[in-house]
Amino acid sequence: MRKRALLPIALTAAAVLGQAVPAQAVDLPYQNRTGVGVPVPARDQAVSPQRMRELAVAFVQPSADNLDASLDKMAEAGVRRAQIVASWTGICQKRDECDWSKLDAYFAKAARRGIATAVHINSTPDWVHPDLVDTVENYGERIWFPPTRTPEELAEFEKFVTTLASRYRGKVESYEIWNEENWRDFYKPVEDPADYAKLLRAGYLSVKAADPRAKVIFGGTTRTDPGFVREVYAAVRKYPDAVKSRHFFDLMGAHPYTDDRHPDDHDPGKVRENAAGGEFDDNFLGIDRLYSEMVRQGDADKQIYLGEFSYSSVRTWMGLVPDDRRAFYLRRVMELAAQRPYVSGLSWFVWSETRPDDEWRGWTLLEYPDKPTRTYLELAELTGASPTERAPRLMLGDGTASVDRLPSNVERVELYLEGVRAASGTSFPLTFTPPARGTTQLAQAVLYTGDGRTIQTTTAWLGAGRPAVQVSHPKVKATRNVDVTAGLKVTGPVLLRVIDASDDVVMTMPLGVGTGRQTRFDALVALDDPGTYQLSVHDQRGRRLSDPALLEVVQ
């Protein structure tokens, strides 16, 4: 099977010294012969509190006895959207006997507080597949067999979704169809893109028939899995109504957990093949890779909904992140998501404990019944619901880091380079090993105080004005550095050009607009065909701003 190389590329291409390298004129308009290119926002871009409020979603438990307190704390934190689960198994334990009381109560409480709601649909009751009761002993496994084995099972699913969407017509913002269907723990007996395409289509058509204004979300994949998504697209297109129905979803879904890793920590080793031979990405910024696949499939106008994300302050199936550091990580997650206009929302899993020390202890932003964690307070600062002080400015020297002002009561400090902790101590300056010459890294420090505050500094780019090509696909070989030729302050469009071994231009894409000072541009390039390519950056007149970087795409 042909492998696609998806490469996050970081390029600094302005406000440098010397002369530009002459180059051939860049062809316009931007016509790509193979693959796609997607500009990616800079990771140091400022984000407004309004955008944070639009993005933030709280994953709440409708059955919790502290639901009122949880919803009140949502309002206090400036969060106006919630996600809830409509478990078919829990609601309809017997055929034609469904208990809607908990959902009814939730919607009444949410309406009083002006909270919008996203509904997640999952699980299959035993009465839909009674034969499995005798063959699959574990009830927790049976519920994750999707109702797709027979036309009768699928008809029952359509009936449930239609009833659900009709009952709460006008009250639900979106419906998500199933949970992590790319993972056999939640899609039995094994993940199956064609089978999920059948379930997605049934759910989409049922929702739209009952509540046309509600959006339908492609079930959030475990991590980001553009390879699985690609296979679902291929299966969906076999239905004659696929184009008319927009591939049977309005929003893409993903659960881009990173275990205990910082969201800026983009590790190429965490990109691997999934069961279908496509890319599976354990990095948070794998969402860029996923969006690139959507663009390739003709869905550039759609957004991605991050239906689950969090860190745990206690050790679980992933490593623990202490609550004060978790607050820092949450800020970066929200900033990275908010910088991407194609992200529609991020749901923190889970919002609150439903009882003291429940099974989600450590994951939640509220301890039972409504005690804020440090991470909750950080979110409230991001949305503008509570005041925040000016961030100290990070100052970088040759292997040293300091700040322009030191808040009182600081007990320890940490320095992160590209999301990886590079130094820690009890005071500034911090000493660290600088990156190799020719690379550019995003740097940020965080300060922890004795009174429980977590204070982030501004971000800064560490390097010598030369960019790095960050290869994130294990099948791709590339030179590490792209040298920016000294001498040109760029104004106007900055373009990335990709040339194949025959010297044909296979892709030209705009990276952004230079303003005459040093500017960093990010892009995601997806190439279909194996071979050796050259990447180079150009100004609006076609003058080359960087020496070419060679990329070898391996079959």
Image (cartoon, rainbow, N blue to C red):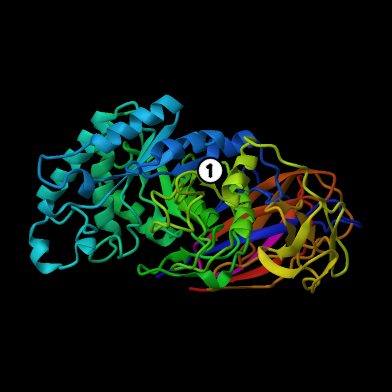
In the rendered image of this protein, does residue 401 appear above or below residue 341?
Answer: below
Q: Nearer the viewer, residue 122 or 3?
A: 122
Where residue 170 sits in the image (x, y, percent)? 34, 26
Q: Is residue 472 magenta?
A: no
Answer yes or no: is residue 504 visible: no
Specify few, some or many for label 1: CA neighbours under 10 Å numbering under 14, 14-19, or 20 or more: some
The residue under the point 75% across, 65% down is: 482
The residue under the point 55% across, 73% down is: 269
Amino acid under label 1?
Answer: Tyr
In the rendered image of this protein, does residue 527 appear above or below residue 341?
Answer: below
In terms of secondary structure, what is the magenta stretch mainly? strand
The residue under the point 60% across, 62% down is: 262
Q: Quadrant of residue 183?
A: bottom left
Residue at the extreme right of the image, as rendered: 18
Check the picture and name the quadrant holding the N terminus.
Answer: bottom left
Q: Is residue 529 magenta?
A: yes
Q: How many marks?
A: 1
In the rendered image of this protein, does residue 200 appear above or below residue 170?
Answer: below
Answer yes or no: is residue 107 visible: yes
Where residue 491 sits in the image (x, y, percent)? 81, 42
Horizontal side of residue 249 vs 401, given as left or right: left
Which residue is disc 1 drawn over? 342
Q: Nearer the viewer, residue 345 or 154?
A: 345
Range covered by the magenta-colored residues: 527-536
Q: Nearer the viewer, residue 128 or 181?
A: 128
The residue under the point 78% across, 50% down is: 519
Provide the secondary structure element on which disc 1 rests.
loop
Horizontal side of residue 8 vs 220, given as left or right: right
Where residue 125 sits in the image (x, y, percent)? 17, 52
Where residue 212 sits in the image (x, y, percent)? 31, 29
Q: Nearer the viewer, residue 27 or 133?
A: 133
